[in-house]
Amino acid sequence: MAEAYERFRPGYPGELVDRVTAYAGRPVRTALEIGAGTGKATRLFARRGIAVTATEPDGAMLAELRKHVLADVRTVRAAFEDVRPEDRYGLVYAAAALHWTNPEGRWSRVAALLEPGGVFASCGGPFRLADPAVEEAVRGARAPFLASDEIPSPDGTPAGHAMQWPGTELRRSEWFTDVQQSVIERRLTMSAPDYVGHLSTVSAYLVLPAPEREQVFRRIARVLPATVAITADITVHLARRRDER
C-alpha cells in the first residue's frame, strides 16, 4: 500500500508548521514523528530546518518515505510503543496516525520524549465529498459493505462536541496543559479514479476481504462524476508538556 499512500494521499499545507511553531513560542529544532507513513508531513517539517526523526513500523512505508524526504531525516522502523526515550525533542507530532497507537500509557510515553515545555501536535480529519448528491450516491453504493468509511472517535467523543479527540484526552492528562484546537480549511479536486485510489488507503476498506473491497470500489466508481470536489479540513491539536517540577 505504500505507493498508493504516496500517490493518493494529499500533502499538508505550510500553515500546519506555522501554527505549530507559533504555538511553541520558541525555535523548534528537533522533532519526533509518530507513524510517518510515506513522509507527507515529514518533508514539510524537515524543509523548515527541523531535525526530524521519523518513526514508522512498516518497512515499505519507510522505503517510500526515504525517496521523498531530505537526506538528513533520521528514520526508525518501530511502532510508537517500541520507541525508546533515549533523546528528548522539542516537538512530538502525529499526522493522521495517532489513532493507530495504543491508548494505554500513550501520554506518558509522549511526555517522556519531550523536553520540558516541549510541544505535542496532532492533525487529521475526514475526507468528505463536497457535493451532497454525490455523497449520497457513494453512501448507497457502499451500503451493502460499509455503513461509514470514517474513523470513529477513539474515545467516543460526539462529532458535534466543541473539543474533539485527542484534545479530550489531552485535557484529562496529567502530563499536558494549554490544549488548543483549530482547523485549517482545505478544498481539493480529484479525478474519480484518484478518489477511488484514495479510498484504497482508508482503513475501513482495507479491513474488508479483497473480493468485497474490489466490488465496493467498482460500485463507487460507477456513481462518480469525472471529477469530484473534496472537503478535507485539517483539525490541529496542540498541547504543552507540563513542568516536571
Image: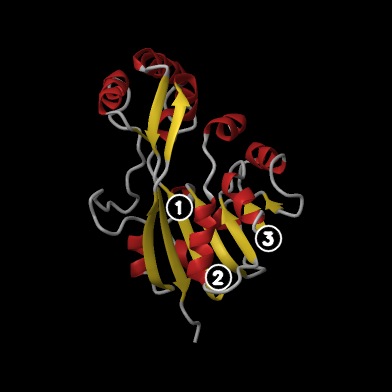
Residue density around tag 2, few if under 14, some if 14–19, many if 20 or more, within 10 Å: some
Gap between marks 1 and 3 measured at Cα: 20 Å
Q: Mark 1 points at which residue?
A: 123
127 to 74, vertically: above or below: above
Q: How many labels does the image show?
A: 3
Q: Looking at the picture, which amino acid does disc 2 mark?
A: Ala
Q: Looking at the picture, which amino acid does disc 3 mark?
A: Gly
Q: Nearer the viewer, mark 3 or mark 2?
A: 3
Image quadrant of residue 162? Answer: bottom left
Query: What coloring was used for the rendering?
Result: secondary structure
Gap between marks 2 and 1 measured at Cα: 20 Å
Q: Mark 2 points at which residue?
A: 112
Q: Relative to the observer, which residue lies in front, 221 or 36? A: 221
Q: Which of marks 1 and 3 is in front?
A: 3
Q: Residue at x 69, y 51 (%)?
A: 75
One can see residue 109 in this view: no
**Circles 1 and 3 in contact, beta carbons < 8 Å:** no
Q: Relative to the observer, which residue lies in front, 202 or 188? A: 188
Indicate the position of residue 207 as horizontal and vertical percent values: 43, 30
Indicate the position of residue 28 as horizontal and vertical percent values: 60, 68
Q: Looking at the picture, which amino acid does disc 1 mark?
A: Cys
Q: Name the residue under label 3.
A: 49
Q: Relative to the observer, which residue lies in front, 204 or 90? A: 90
Q: Residue at x 67, y 37 (%)?
A: 64
Residue density around tag 1, few if under 14, some if 14–19, many if 20 or more, within 10 Å: many
**Sequence-first disc among 1 and 3:** 3
Indicate the position of residue 4 as horizontal and vertical percent values: 57, 29
**Sequence-first disc among 3 and 2:** 3
Residue density around tag 3, few if under 14, some if 14–19, many if 20 or more, within 10 Å: few
Indicate the position of residue 123 as horizontal and vertical percent values: 45, 52
One can see residue 87 in this view: yes
